[in-house]
Image (cartoon, rainbow, N blue to C red):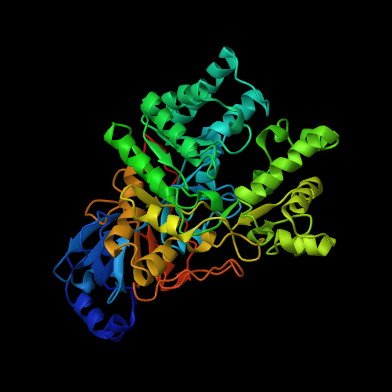
Amino acid sequence: MDSCPRRMRGPILGALLPVALSLSCARTPDAGWDVLIRGGTVVDGTGAPGYAADVAVRGDRIVRVSRTPLDPAGAAVVIDATGKVVSPGFVDLHTHLDPLLRLPGAESHVRQGVTTALGGPDGGGPWPFAPYLDSVQAVGVGMNVGFLAGHNTIRQAVMGLENRDPTPEELERMEAMVAQSMDEGAWGMSTGLKYLPGAFSKLDELVALSRVAGERGGIYTSHLREEGLGLVQGVAEAMEIGRRARIPVVLTHHKVVGQPMWGASARTLAMVDSARAAGTDVMIDQYPYTASYTGITVLVPAWALAGGTKDFLARMDDPALADSILAGIEFNIMNDRGGNDLHRVQFALVDWDQSLEGKTLWDLAEREGVEPTPANGARLVVEVIRRGGASAIFHAMDEGDVEAIMRHPMTMIASDGRLTQPGEGHPHPRWYGTFPRVLGVYVREKAVLGLEEAVHKMSGMPAHRMGLTARGEVREGWFADLVVFDPATVKDMATFENPHQYPVGIPWVLVNGKVAVDDGVFTDVRSGRVLRKGTD
């Protein structure tokens, strides 16, 4: 490597460039670093207090973390981190990576400081497993990615959308598919018990499949069966699966949905404490918003969706069944994700009518010339499904629950975001802003978390829960997944009204030692790796 620095970053070092060059060329340095991050405050991901230190990178590893200033003459690239924090790259335990082959650079995540993401949540992991991972590796990715085996994917492959228990032979096939996924690099198994066909599964099935993943060192992440009126029962079910299957559990995107349940986080968090005291390893992940995002069919009773959309619409042609379905949707509008107000259901992706994107169910009622009542809202939901469906943002959570869950010592930050790019639909702002929002709103503005605690919840904690080695901390010998952010200015810019906005205050991101965001400019270097459990 040329001993003279090729580039220097930051106004102070830029002014010293001639001196640095003369020093480095006057003698042979003993370092040969690829990147040197100077003058920052290292918050190392363990929760320990930050400290002033320089961080040197060679290849894909951190080779020096020095409280004594390091000579920039030995570095090819120097980053001036004066006044900024140097932290581990953020680890997102709940990421919808479906668009990865189309958006391999993962800019919407990398710009947030995310250097590792775990895909396949909510029961939606890939199958067949290994060929998909091979295809991701072949295209090259902007951040490290791993995947969970998806219960819904596996169950549908074996049983379709049938509302029944598996036969012994079918359960054996599903167990074999979970085992194969784990052997091919899955980090655990996810369930989406609010969605089909997971909603049709019962406890014994879930325990049997989770046990297969647990025996191979995996984790169990669960979109609970209910997050509204049935929340407490949903949490209890996840803990029972963890206890019986002897597998670590993550209550994923933990939240309290619907006004009748607001405040119930006090009970669910106490349940987590009790389960942990009794020996069940339960943790939580959470996004920092009071609105959720999913398909509009979440408002429909699960039994009505058995067999898929065609069968659902056939049931709607039966007056007796239609009355029951409409009553169930109306109930969910009033008591669950509908928030008892059609303004709270905001369309996000509507392929058949993009003019609805960003508008609400209330707006649709006005456009159709009907009174915006829950009953009429239910009929409109059916019509939306009939026309092709939609995804939506549901503003049905309370800030008090969000903050209480965030403070809990077992809570990690995860986006539940989908990879995106400007111009694609009207996404939830978490797709662009989860991690900077925690730092800007919940650390700097509201002081819900301390800085070191927040970084720990975004890096070291999720890395350990996932089972990663040598990632999630700023430590010599560990992978150089690093973020440099300004604690005074870091901020999410994406809003519910205008979501397609990248955050500010995160000028540098390194993935495996390569600069992925360079002084605010996304480089699309694609230095991420496909992480397979047991081989990475």
Left or right: residue 37 versus residue 149 is left
Which part of the image, by quadrant, shows the N terminus?
Answer: bottom left
Q: Nearer the viewer, residue 339 or 237?
A: 339
Which part of the image, by quadrant, shows the C terminus?
Answer: top left
Q: Position of residue 353 (x, y in %)?
A: 78, 59
Q: Nearer the viewer, residue 57 or 461?
A: 461
Decide if residue 356 is in sight here: yes
Left or right: residue 427 versus residue 527 is right
Q: Position of residue 279 (x, y in %)?
A: 29, 31
Q: Quadrant of residue 57?
A: bottom left
Q: Position of residue 176 (x, y in %)?
A: 51, 21
Q: Nearer the viewer, residue 266 or 215?
A: 266
**Name of the residue lying farthest toward the left:** 68
Q: Nearer the viewer, residue 156 or 244?
A: 244
Residue 451 lies, with reference to residue 536, above or below; the image says below
For the point 71% across and 35% down, the residue is: 305
Q: Quadrant of residue 373?
A: bottom right
For the point 61% across and 38% down, the residue is: 195
**Name of the residue lying farthest toward the front:** 260
Decide if residue 467 is in sight here: no
Left or right: residue 125 versus residue 144 is right
Q: How many marks?
A: 0
Residue 154 lies, with reference to residue 125, above or below; the image says above
Q: Position of residue 530 (x, y in %)?
A: 45, 44
Q: Quadrant of residue 359?
A: bottom right
For the point 25% across and 79% down, the residue is: 21
